[in-house]
Amino acid sequence: MLAAPAPAPPRRTPLASRVLRGPAGDPAWTRPALLVLLVATALLYLWGLGASGWANSFYSAAAQAGSASWKAFFYGSSDASNAITVDKPPASLWVMALSVRVFGLSSWSILVPQALMGVGSVALLYATVRRWSGPVAGLLAGAILATTPVAVLMFRFNNPDALLVLLMVAGAYATVRAIETASTRWLVLTGVLVGFGFLTKMLQALLVVPAFALAYLVAAPTPLRRRITQVLWGGLAMVVAAGWWVAIVELVPARYRPYVGGSQDNSILELTLGYNGLGRLNGDETGSVGGGQGGGWGQTGLTRLFDAENGGQVAWLLPAALMLLITAFALLHRRPVPRAGGLSASEANAGGLSASEADAGKLGTDRTRASLILWGGWLLVTGLVFSLMQGIFHAYYNVALAPAVGAVVAVGAAVLWRERTNPAVAAILAGTTAITALWAWVLLGRSADWHPWLRAAVLVLGLASAAAFLLAGRLARWAVSLVAAAAVGAGLLGPVGYALSTASTPHTGAIPTAGPAVAGGRGFGPGGGGGPGGGAPGGGGFRGGLPGGGGPGGAQGVPGGGQAFGAPGGTRGGGMGGLLDATTPDAELAAALSEDAGSYTWVAATVGANNAAGYQLATELPVMAIGGFNGSDPSPTLEQFQRYVAEGKVHYFLGGAGLGRSNGGSDAAQEIAAWVADNFTATTVGGVTLYDLS
């Protein structure tokens, strides 16, 4: 008798089909909708990207240096001859430098990686939210992130924030996967991702750690003792992932590496804990430019994120996020939502639980609560730190809030949507929609001359949707869905308008802002920073300005002298003089710098990294940035610079660069400038004062 044939193994779905159709349990339309979202995001972030030129020339020059020297690549040096590093860790520079090595030096090779990081962040946020709240919530979260004005700005720019956001969202995804099966490996991956976030922007990456840890400790399906042990393993992975580079920099003797930019004693630990650490919280940032104790960086307080400088960047849906977070927690507390179907056998086994323990859900809370803890904790901790920090603070920092705002709105809305037939919940949905529309009306009113019809459209659509929500219990399902779509449209119309304005405006300099001009800000425009005492040209950014100094492009004073924000001749407009935007040398000056370049370690030296960046990008040759970013670091000292000149390592000194107002930094740059002026003859080439030191 013949044995019955073994059943054929299930056929594996082709990869292309899985990509197009998505997970088996999702509605057929969700994967095409996701692909549309990602393609639209890519177009928004890539279209006309080259118009921003070098964007932040400070980082573009460091990327160029890293593409020419592996030593500069590793340390994040401002120049290929390794005089000084940028004032951040180098992870974001590694991405740009590798791109420049492969594709050559251009605006696109520097900025396209940032745009792709943005698309990746949107995709990861969708995947993270979808796992526990469904594909509709995932799409909503992704759309909110994609269209947040400050996200559009930073994913079209080359500051470290693009990589930081990608790593933090990836860390959230790894945390969610860890919670599902109490997986130590996924939690270790979370630690590694946060650690590399530290290597991107230091302590800012750690703001998400409390939320990640609390979500895991509360919700992972395993005994508490094991959860604590796993979190400690994740913490160890974070320390190792962040600490290996820090340890190398700290242990290598100073004579074998570049000076640590942003520090006053050539220490990466001092930079981490001081200028880029506690100094950001208490305002005690030695060597920084601008007023300390929050005076130069806007008013601190719980309303900071809603003010003229920050509101239009990220706060469009912030009131809605806070309302939905509180309401969703209240609903889940009043009527606990069990884990859908309980824990699977694999989850129970992975967590070391018996079937009865798993079914009873004795450990942890449901995944919806865990999701709210994760994203709500991210939002609250980061928002409070940004609101209260007294040190250097720029509006573009708010991009770190964008994923959390999108996720909290999406998850909270999903919780309330399940209870929409409850009159009280319908009233909350209506109130949230109305407040969001009114808040958008306020934000758009700060740029009242910019498409005034949009302000009226948002208000009418939002209030109409809010009124319709009150009738949700009496409407057909399709009608309620239409109302929800209208409410989402009302909430996104304002930020989408700002996002399109941001994408259509070139941005350069160190302090970019998203959206059109608004009243009541501090003078920073899309060009990076309005000229001191005035807004940036071109209609973008904040009106008003910082006192003192000359306008963009105005060379003032002796080389490196004075406290004005003067810039050397040839500086492009829209920046804070030579400090916050790069110089753009003409062909005559670039040719002079390139002449006999192989005979020198640095073809030129000038005060401030942004001044040096323009010359370096024009010639692709090393230019020494005296004093680092602010011109206030003690590197090189006068004695060191005199030795470099005596050894024939520096060809030219470029004058006309103004110093920022230093908060207790070094005077070495001023001493060097004065020594050069006293001992060498000045000539003018291409409108720039030039001293031949050979």
Image: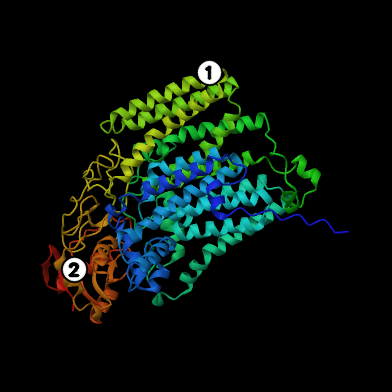
Q: Position of residue 535 (x, y in %)?
A: 23, 43
Residue at x-position 48% and y-position 43%: 142
Side of 371 where 32 appears, left or right? left
Quadrant of the snapshot with the C terminus: bottom left
The circle on residue 590 is: 2
Please give the count of numbered marks on the rendered protein: 2
| Residue tagged 1 | 471
Which residue type does callout 2 highlight? Ala
Q: Position of residue 690 (x, y in %)?
A: 15, 69
Front residue of this view, candidates 475 and 375: 475
Front residue of this view, candidates 245 and 291: 245
How was the colour assigned to the protein in this rendering? rainbow
Which residue type does callout 1 highlight? Leu
Q: Farthest right residue?
A: 1
Relative to 558, residue 483 above or below: above
Instruction: Please tell me whether mark 1 sits on a helix, a strand or a loop.
Output: loop
Residue neighbourhood size for the residue with mark 2, other residues' Cα within 10 Å, grouped as few (<14), some (14–19), many (≥20)? some
Side of 490 where 516 appears, left or right? left
Relative to 664, residue 681 above or below: below
Residue 384 visible (yes or no):
no
Closer mark to the observer between disc 2 and disc 1: 1
Quadrant of the snapshot with the N terminus: bottom right
Q: Contact, CB < 8 Å: mark 2 with mark 1?
A: no
Relative to 163, residue 396 above or below: above
Corner quadrant of residue 649: bottom left
Going from N to C along the chain, the mark reached first, 2 or 1, is 1
- Between the residue at mark 2 and the residue at mark 1, the CA separation in whole angstroms equals 69 Å
Residue at x-position 42% and y-position 60%: 92
Residue at x-position 57% and y-position 48%: 210
Q: Position of residue 676 (x, y in %)?
A: 18, 71
Q: Position of residue 398 (x, y in %)?
A: 42, 45
